[in-house]
């Protein structure tokens, strides 16, 4: 590394396009219109609705970018069909429960319980049956989720083999992240770095909940002071946090918190928080598009308020400036760089 590179940050590209966030609502009372719509959305076939006592009605809402979108589907009738979402991973939960996936496979059928997320079968068609009601879904672009799954390793992105159901103790953190990020992600005005960090947090939480774990290695341990503090910092790293805030969340004094971190982590809680923010910023920059996201936007969304200090800390940690990462070709994939024509946005995204 040359002395000039070590002291002079490279110029930042100011030609930044704003992330495209779409908001889409489709509603109607015609079963044939609904059948055609749902077959298009889920690359489905044989979608059918059973006549019911109530007048038929459906409503579908989606908000998101090319990486992650949050959706809600409400139908007043029983429905069934064969679904095969193309290059997407779909996290879903039903308000009322009762939806059955793979109901044509007696030994593999899964019935959704109210409010418990499952992952739709990926990479193959599957049959589903659902009673009248409302379902919430999170659609992850396959390239994006596969890239997030291998960030930090030398592996290349490959299709993920995710189970339909997750262990109950692994769903808690996912539900906590969903509750926190969903209201903001449903705002189409939240774009750029702020949107990217929310996409990443939700993707990481889904992978953590559903990615297979070696049962021989996995073990359950009681929550400790350090673990409670880490969980709080992970959930709120994008906000201004003082040692007193972290200690209160861990239900200990500041002194006890500091002693615990020194003993088990050989660092301070505020230093650990800074390292967490740097990791999140690096991930955001690696998966971003230089034409859609700025260094400042990513840094701000990860809790950094002073750009000079952020740039210096980042260069000291990773040996390159944030702009180098954003510009570089080493990022695994820039899903956000995909452009979708306005005439195709409804079909492809939603």
Image (tube, rainbow, N blue to C red):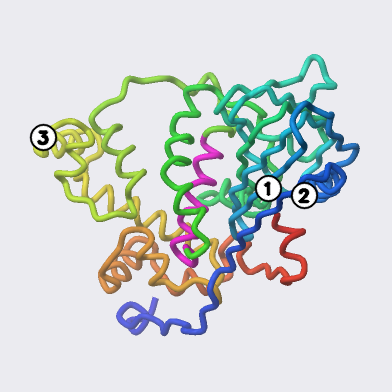
Q: Mark 2 falls on what kind of element?
A: helix
Q: Residue at x 41, y 82 (%)?
A: 10
Q: Residue at x 51, y 22 (%)?
A: 168
The range drawn in magenta is 190-208
Numbered tag placed on residue 149 in the rendering: none
Can you give x and y, in whole percent of width and height, for residue 348 in the image? 75, 59
Instruction: Point out the frontmost of discs 3 and 1.
Output: 1
Can you give x and y, in whole percent of width and height, for residue 319 in the image? 39, 66
Numbered tag placed on residue 41 in the rendering: 2
Q: Are marks 1 and 2 in contact (CB under 8 Å)?
A: yes
Q: Earlier in the sequence, mark 3 or mark 2?
A: 2
Q: Residue at x 89, y 40 (%)?
A: 45
Q: Report whether 116 appears left or right of 264.
A: right
Instruction: Point out the frontmost of discs 1 and 2.
Output: 1
Work out which quarter of the rendered image holds the C terminus and state it. Answer: bottom right
Q: Which residue is mark 1?
A: 60
Q: Which residue is mark 3?
A: 253
């Amino acid at each position: 590394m040359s002395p000039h590179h070590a002291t002079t940050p490279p110029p930042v590209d100011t030609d930044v396009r704003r992330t495209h966030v779409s908001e889409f609502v489709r509603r109607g009372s015609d079963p044939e219109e609904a059948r055609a719509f749902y077959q298009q959305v889920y690359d489905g076939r044989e979608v059918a609705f059973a006549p019911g006592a109530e007048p038929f009605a459906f409503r579908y809402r989606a908000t998101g970018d090319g990486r992650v979108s949050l959706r809600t589907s409400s139908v007043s009738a029983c429905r069934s069909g064969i679904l095969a979402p193309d290059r997407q991973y779909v996290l879903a939960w039903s308000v009322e429960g009762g939806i059955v996936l793979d109901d044509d496979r007696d030994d593999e059928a899964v019935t959704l319980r109210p409010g418990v997320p499952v992952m739709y079968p990926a990479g193959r068609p599957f049959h589903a049956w659902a009673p009248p009601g409302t379902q919430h879904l999170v659609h992850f672009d396959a390239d994006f989720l596969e890239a997030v799954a291998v960030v930090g390793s030398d592996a290349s992105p490959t299709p993920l083999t995710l189970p339909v159901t997750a262990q109950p103790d692994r769903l808690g953190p996912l539900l906590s992240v969903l509750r926190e990020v969903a209201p903001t992600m449903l705002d189409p005005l939240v774009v750029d770095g702020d949107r990217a960090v929310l996409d990443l947090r939700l993707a990481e939480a889904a992978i953590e909940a559903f990615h297979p774990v070696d049962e021989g290695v996995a073990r359950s341990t009681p929550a400790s002071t350090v673990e409670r503090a880490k969980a709080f910092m992970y959930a709120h790293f994008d906000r201004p946090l003082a040692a007193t805030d972290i200690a209160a969340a861990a239900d200990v004094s500041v002194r006890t918190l500091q002693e615990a971190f020194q003993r088990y982590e050989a660092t301070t809680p505020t230093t650990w928080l800074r390292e967490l923010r740097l990791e999140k910023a690096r991930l955001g920059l690696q998966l971003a598009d230089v034409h859609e996201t700025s260094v400042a936007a990513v840094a701000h969304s990860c809790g950094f308020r002073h750009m000079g200090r952020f740039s210096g800390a980042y260069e000291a940690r990773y040996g390159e400036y944030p702009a180098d990462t954003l510009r570089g070709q080493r990022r695994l994939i820039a899903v956000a760089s995909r452009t979708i024509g306005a005439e195709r946005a409804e079909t492809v995204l939603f």
